[in-house]
Image (spheres, grey):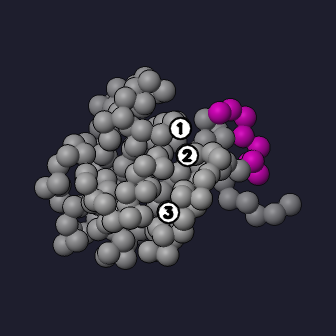
C-alpha cells in the first residue's frame, strides 16, 4: 500500500468539526502516512479553539506548520507531498487560490498542488452561494482541484452530529484515494 504525505489546511470558516474529525481519523490511520502536516490560518485556529475547544497537541502524529512559513517543504513543487485538504475552506481562501494569489502557506501549497497535478480538495462551508463563489469554484474545478461542499449524507443513518459530519470527512478520504474503514452506499 502506497503511503501518503498529506497536508491539511484549516481556515476560519465555521464547521471546525470537520477538521477535528479529519484529524481524529488521520491520527487513527497514521501508519498509512509518511507525514501528516497541518496548517492553521490565524482565524482558523481561533475558530477551532472556539468551536472545538481541544488542544491540538493531542494529535501526536501531526506536524504543525505556521501559515507564514513559506519555507515549508510542500511550498515547492519539488516536494513529494501528494494531497492537500482544506477543511473547512473559507470563501476568502477559495477566492485567493482560484485567482492565483498565493500569499500564505495554505494558498501557496494549493498553487503547488494545482501546478503539479496533485490532489487538492477544498471542503467549502458557506451557504447560500453568490455568483463570485460559484465562479471561483468553477475556476478551481477547471484547474484540477476538487470542491467538496460540506454536504453530509444520510445513507448510513447517522445518530449524532459527529456521525453526520463524519460522512463528509469519509467522502474526503475517498476522494483522496486513501482507504479507511467507512460506510459506502451499496443500494437497497
Name the residue carrying label 3: 136
Pointers 3 and 2 in contact (C-beta within 8 Å): no
Front position among marks 3 and 2: 3
Q: Is residue 3 visible?
A: no
Helix, strand or loop at mark 2: loop
In percent of width and height, residue 37 lies at 29, 50
Q: Is residue 115 magenta?
A: no
Helix, strand or loop at mark 1: loop
In percent of width and height, residue 89 lies at 46, 49
Q: CA distance from mark 2 to mark 1?
A: 7 Å
Residue extending furthest toward the right: 188
Give the main secondary structure of the magenta stretch.
Answer: loop
**Residue 144 sits above or below residue 57 on the image:** below
Q: Horizontally, is 186 left or right of 104 in the view?
A: right
* The C terminus sits in image quarter: bottom right
Pointers 3 and 1 in contact (C-beta within 8 Å): no
| Residue density around tag 2, few if under 14, some if 14–19, many if 20 or more, within 10 Å | many
Which contiguous range is marked in magenta?
Answer: 154-161
Name the residue carrying label 2: 125
Pointers 2 and 1 in contact (C-beta within 8 Å): yes
Name the residue carrying label 1: 15
Q: Horizontally, is 126 left or right of 88 in the view?
A: right
**Residue 117 sits above or below residue 30 on the image:** below
**Residue 26 sits above or below residue 95 on the image:** above
Q: Earlier in the sequence, mark 2 or mark 1?
A: 1
Amino acid at each position: 500500500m502506497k503511503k501518503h504525505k498529506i497536508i491539511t489546511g484549516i481556515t476560519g470558516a465555521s464547521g471546525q468539526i470537520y477538521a477535528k474529525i479529519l484529524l481524529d481519523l488521520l491520527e487513527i490511520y497514521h501508519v498509512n502516512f509518511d507525514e501528516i502536516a497541518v496548517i492553521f490560518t490565524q482565524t482558523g485556529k481561533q475558530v477551532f479553539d472556539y468551536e472545538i475547544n481541544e488542544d491540538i497537541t493531542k494529535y501526536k502524529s501531526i506536524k504543525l506548520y505556521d501559515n507564514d512559513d513559506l519555507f515549508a517543504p510542500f511550498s515547492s513543487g519539488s516536494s513529494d507531498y501528494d494531497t492537500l485538504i482544506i477543511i473547512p475552506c473559507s470563501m476568502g481562501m477559495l477566492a485567493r487560490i482560484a485567482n492565483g494569489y498565493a500569499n500564505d502557506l495554505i494558498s501557496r501549497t494549493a498553487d503547488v498542488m494545482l501546478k503539479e497535478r496533485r490532489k487538492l480538495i477544498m471542503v467549502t462551508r458557506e451557504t447560500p452561494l453568490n455568483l463570485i463563489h460559484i465562479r471561483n469554484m468553477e475556476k478551481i474545478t477547471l484547474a484540477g482541484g476538487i470542491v467538496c461542499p460540506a454536504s453530509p449524507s444520510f445513507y448510513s443513518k447517522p445518530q449524532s452530529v459527529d456521525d453526520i459530519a463524519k460522512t463528509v470527512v469519509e467522502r474526503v478520504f475517498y476522494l483522496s484515494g486513501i482507504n479507511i474503514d467507512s460506510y459506502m452506499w451499496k443500494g437497497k
